[in-house]
Amino acid sequence: FSLLIRAAKLVADCGEYLCIVRDISATGTRLKLFHDLPPPGFMALELAKALTVPAVVSVHNSRGICGEVVAQANMVIAVSEAVAQRCIELGADPARVVTVHNRVDRELFSPTGEPAPGPAGSPKLLCIAREHQQKNLDRVLEACAMAAREYPGLKLVHFGQSTRDFKKWPFVQ
């Protein structure tokens, strides 16, 4: 750990940023910035250029995607088809966009076998999602309706902001 109080300038293709270097240690550097940083991903692009390594950008939602970042990235990893499509609309090369869905532990969660009973004895599906296109609540409701035919008493428990009227779905709690 070395205590420093020095003026510095971060220089990147996207701009120059005045800062003060507060300290440097084995775990990193602390800076005091006087400007807003560029959108997420710009500094990763700069670092990749400096290190001469490919820039891989992971995009988790469609809010705040910077078209310039996804357009310059060597690879864009999106968590859904909707997010991948939005990256392409903003300038990403479709050949460099890959969708990797959120992972599920197949040993704990399996599409075969009996569903585990919920606290009240009936099986429950938990959905934690806000009302947004990328969350695709319509698909969740369709899937739950299909599962409810096979598992009578199935309940969907939804947490998240939504203006949707869930009363027309008898399995929603």
Image (spheres, rainbow, N blue to C red):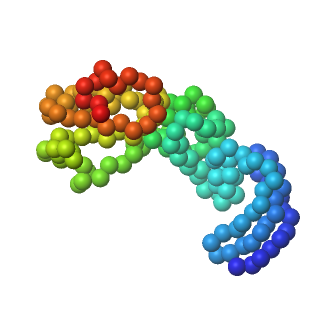
Position of residue 32 relative to residue 78, above or below, is below
Q: Closest to the observer: 97 or 62?
A: 62
Toward which corner of the image does residue 51 lie, by quadrant? Answer: bottom right
Is any atom of residue 9 visible in this view? yes
Left or right: residue 77 versus residue 144 is right
In the image, residue 165 above or below residue 26: above
Say which residue appears at 18% left-offset and 47% top-offset: 116
Nearest the eye: 104 or 160: 160
Residue ID at (42%, 43%): 100
Counting the numbered discs, the total is 0
Identify which residue is drawn at 81% across, 59% down. Answer: 19
- Is residue 69 toward the left or the right of residue 61 in the image? right
Direction from residue 51 to residue 112 in the image, left or right? left
Instruction: Give the image location of residue 46, x and y in percent.
Output: 69, 52
Residue nearer the viewer, 146 or 68:
146
Residue 50, quarter of picture: bottom right
Q: Tell me, yes or no, if residue 95 can be seen here.
A: no
Q: Indicate the position of residue 144 as horizontal and vertical percent values.
A: 26, 31
Quadrant in the picture for the N terminus: bottom right
| Quarter of the figure with the C terminus | top left
Q: Position of residue 79 (x, y in %)?
A: 45, 41
Residue at 25%, 25% in the rendered image: 170
